[in-house]
């Protein structure tokens, strides 16, 4: 079978166009690769689970206790790092409930544990001479 030069060039161009179209549709990154890059971007700050004030840009060991550092969850950047935050389900499991402080008619009694201390700034005494 004798194929002329024009047909060979046309077949080569068709092959190249087919490879380019296939690369566009099927040559992109997979979801696993996207997830890996997403985890890397989220895990830029590493912290110790026992010492949350320790923050490092790479994984390693805590300088205080030697535990492995864990990736810091993003989204809590506006919260004070010294503050304690719990999810709703963790609060239910721990039996923690909160109430707003205010003046009410005293409809509900709440038993609280604690100490009452006198404000020393408001206590005055005068010694007689």
Image: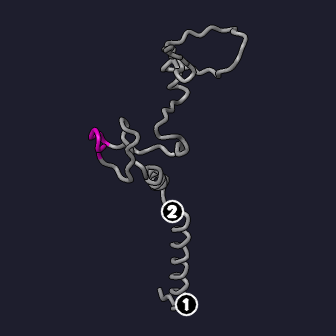
Place of residue 68 in the rendered image (x, y in percent of width and height, measured from the top left): 31, 42
Q: Mostly what secondary structure, the magenta segment?
A: loop
Place of residue 11 in the rendered image (x, y in percent of width and height, measured from the top left): 53, 81
Nearer the observer, disc 1 or disc 2? 2
**Label 1 Cα neighbours within 10 Å, binned few <14 / some 14-19 / many ≥20:** few
Q: Residue furthest front?
A: 129
In depth, the one of 33 and 109 nearer the eye is 109
> From which residue to which does the magenta span run?
61-68
Q: Verify CB contact (< 8 Å) between mark 1 and mark 2.
A: no
- In the rendered image of this protein, does residue 101 appear above or below residue 34? above
Which residue in the protein does label 1 denote?
6
Distance between the alpha carbons at the discs numbered 1 and 2: 33 Å
Place of residue 20 in the rendered image (x, y in percent of width and height, measured from the top left): 53, 73
- Which residue does the image show at 37% across and 38% down from the upper left? 51
- In the rendered image of this protein, does residue 27 appear above or below residue 127? below
Which SS class for mark 2? loop
Which residue in the protein does label 2 denote?
28
Which SS class for mark 1? helix
- Which residue does the image show at 55% across and 44% down from the upper left? 78
- Which residue does the image show at 46% across and 37% down from the upper left? 82
- In the rendered image of this protein, does residue 15 appear above or below residue 122? below
Q: How many labels does the image show?
A: 2
- In the rendered image of this protein, does residue 50 appear above or below residue 91? below
Place of residue 55 in the rendered image (x, y in percent of width and height, measured from the top left): 39, 47
């Amino acid at each position: 079978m004798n194929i002329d030069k024009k047909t060979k060039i046309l077949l080569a161009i068709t092959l190249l166009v087919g490879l380019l179209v296939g690369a566009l549709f099927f040559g992109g990154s997979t979801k696993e690769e996207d997830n890996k890059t997403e985890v890397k971007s989220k895990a830029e700050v590493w912290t110790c689970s026992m010492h949350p004030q320790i923050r490092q840009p790479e994984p390693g060991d805590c300088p205080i206790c030697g535990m492995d550092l864990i990736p810091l969850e993003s989204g809590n950047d506006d919260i004070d790092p010294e503050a304690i935050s719990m999810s709703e389900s963790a609060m239910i499991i721990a039996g923690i409930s909160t109430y707003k402080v205010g003046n009410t008619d005293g409809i509900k009694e709440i038993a609280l544990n604690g100490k009452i201390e006198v404000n020393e700034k408001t206590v005055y005494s005068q010694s007689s001479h």
